[in-house]
Amino acid sequence: MRIDDVMIPRAEIVAVEEQTTLPDLVRLFADTTHSRLPVYRETLDDPIGLVHIKDLVSVLADQSDGEETDALRPLTGLRREILYVPPSMRLRDLLVKMQSTRIHLALVVDEYGGTDGLVSLEDLVEQIVGEIEDEHDDDAPLITAKGRGIFEADARAEIDDFLEDSGFDMSLSEYEDEIDTLGGVVFAIAGRVPQRGEIIRHPNGVDLEIIDADTRRIRRIRVRCPVDAAPKSGNSIGYDI
């Protein structure tokens, strides 16, 4: 699958001009569900980076601690780098690029340098574990205990729910709030959609066996927790990203 199959089209991109003030930026983040927004000069065809809500929160925290901050200053000082990718790039290649650069937002640009669309890490994960067809009963539990330390889970099962059921934190700190499902965790660690029967090892020692998947999507996972070990959190995946 290519990026242009999943990207947000240009007309739907929410972005900010580089001279936007901090109060206006706060209002914009409050009105959207995004954690990152592209930044541009004059038009979206002249992008210069992105702004992350974490950096904005840090500035606001400094203000609350009594540090002097110019509330009307533009957001330029908060700007981070953004990726620029062609619409023909494969999703798997973009995931690898996001992992290697630790930049999780990409603008899709055409051969003339114009902005065609936007794609985030969340968009990639949605394609792998999101909206699965009606082949599963909506009333069926997403996580089922199968034995001591063994669970079977829908790829859409949330990390927080699995923590509650098993005591094991499957989150990956590198991805902050961007990945919240077990399928997304598998996708991020493997860097691809694993084949049925493949086992992916989480850094906390949990084994994730793919029991239902095709070439494009993870559907079900068998989770084996180390029963003789205390539950641990996933602070770092097994490679440097």
Image (cartoon, grey):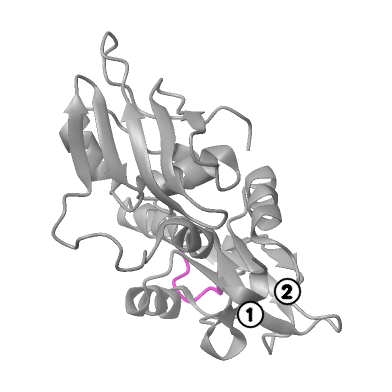
Q: Dot 1 lies on which element?
A: strand
- Residue 230, image quadrant: top left
Q: Tell me which residue sits at (53%, 38%) in the image.
A: 189
Give residue 32's position: percent from left, percent from top.
37, 76
Image side of residue 81 versus residue 225, left or right: right
Image side of residue 157 versus residue 82, left or right: left
The residue under label 2 is which amino acid type? Pro
Q: Residues within 10 Å of mark 2 (few under 14, many from 20)?
A: many
Can residue 176 be seen from the camera position used here? Answer: no
**148 drawn magenta:** no
Give residue 140's position: percent from left, percent from top.
16, 54
Image side of residue 211 versus residue 190, left or right: left
Name the residue that disc number 2 marks. Answer: 87
Q: How much space separates mark 2 and mark 1, taking CA atoms? A: 8 Å
Stretch of the chain drawn in magenta: 69-75
Q: Tell me which residue sits at (19%, 23%) in the image.
A: 147
Q: Main secondary structure of the magenta part?
A: loop
Q: Which disc is residue 117 wearing?
A: 1
Image label count: 2
The answer to which of marks 2 and 1 sits earlier in the sequence is 2
Q: Nearer the viewer, residue 31 or 210?
A: 210
Q: Are marks 2 and 1 in contact (CB under 8 Å)?
A: yes
User: Which quarter of the rendering shows the C terminus?
Assistant: top right
Q: Dot 2 lies on which element?
A: loop
Q: Nearer the viewer, residue 177 or 137?
A: 137
